[in-house]
Image (cartoon, rainbow, N blue to C red):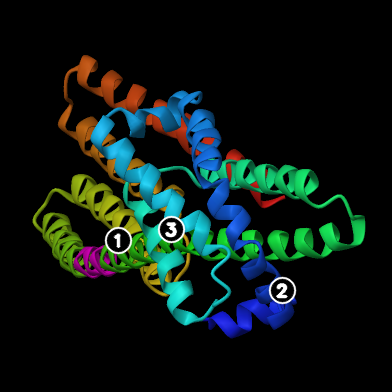
Amino acid sequence: MLTMQEIKSHYYFTDTDAKLLEELLPLAEKNCEAMVEEFYGYLLKIPETAAFLRDPKELQKLRKTHAQWFLSLFCGRYDNGYMITLQSIGQAHVRIKVSAHYVSAAMNVVRRFLIELLQANFPEIERRRKYRIAVEKILDINLDIMSTSYQEEELRKVFVSHRLESKLIHAAERFTYGLNLVLVVALIIVSLSVVGLFFWDLVHVFSGSMEKGILSALGSLLILWMMIELMDNEIKTLKGGKFNILIFIGVIIVALIREILISTLRHDALETQAFLAGTLLILGIVYFLVAKSQNVNAH
């Protein structure tokens, strides 16, 4: 965090400027009430700022506080204690949710009041110019320090939001990764079951149901082949690759083909076979459209 000395150096605010401002203190005291009247007359005309000034007691308290702040502009001593006071003012505005826009606009009212005050009291251009430069510097410093409270509040919100968001995303990623591991284990179990099914189909071949056994075994081999493809795709996903939905659709299509072969051997009802064939046709169209879409995106 910058010190008051550093801030003053950035605005080329010198001890001479401080003395010039201190010379203006009697004039500021004389016109303090007029400034407060103009300042709050401006705020009360704006619905957004007038909403903070509805309570008469609170308004009287604020008028007194702003009068003290106005006179502090000409105190001649601008150290870290002065900066802390300004930070407190900025934090108070942040707390009650006054937009930074209205703080800047209100500061412009004070600026215009002081410039007009200098023009009315110092006809000599060179002398007035020196006072005006000093006044401009201290007002800019005040606005800078007060505005810092708004910047810190925004950064705090962003930091908290970003930290929470990062933790949620990390937790979701770990959860998804865990689910993928579970899926791989499930695929291994299912693949072993398909291998068992294949050998069971071979039993049918040697037990007399040769045609049914061969077709069933062929269907089981197709499913096993697609399971291998599905597992390979899932492993690539775990390594950071993208999941290929075509593999998943392919497994369903192969399983459906096997079911159609078995249904034919069982001489199932025509409606059942027509339903299976229609489903296979729909899946084939879906497979074609997805494959075409992926090819277009690849190019």
Q: First in sequence, mark 2 or 3: give its number.
A: 2
Q: Main secondary structure of the magenta part?
A: helix
Q: Amino acid at mark 3?
A: Gly
Q: First in sequence, mark 1 or 3: give its number.
A: 3
Q: Which residue is mark 3?
A: 90
In the current view of this chain or complex, which residue is farthest to the left? 207
Which residue is at the front of the view, 190 or 174? 174
Q: First in sequence, mark 1 or 2: give its number.
A: 2
> Where is residue 285 shown, x and y percent of the image?
48, 30
**Mark 2 residue crowding within 10 angstroms, few (<14) / some (14–19) / many (20+):** many
**Placement of 164 over or under 285, stated as above or below:** below
Question: For the point 24% across and 70% down, which residue is it?
Answer: 181
> Where is residue 156 shown, x and y percent of the image?
38, 64
Instruction: Provide the secondary structure element on which disc 2 rests.
Output: helix
**Span shown in magenta:** 174-184
Q: Is residue 243 visible?
A: no
Q: Which mark is residue 155?
A: none
Q: Which residue is mark 1?
A: 224
Marks 1 and 2, how far apart in space? Answer: 87 Å
**Placement of 22 over or under 69, stated as above or below:** below
- Which one is in front in this view, the residue at disc 2 or the one at disc 3? 2
Tell me: 91 left or right of 275.
right
Q: Amino acid at mark 2?
A: Asp
Question: For the point 32% across and 39% down, which residue is it?
Answer: 60
Q: Quadrant of residue 291?
A: top right
Question: For the point 23% across and 16% down, which residue is it?
Answer: 270
**Mark 1 residue crowding within 10 angstroms, few (<14) / some (14–19) / many (20+):** many
Marks 1 and 3, how far apart in space? Answer: 70 Å
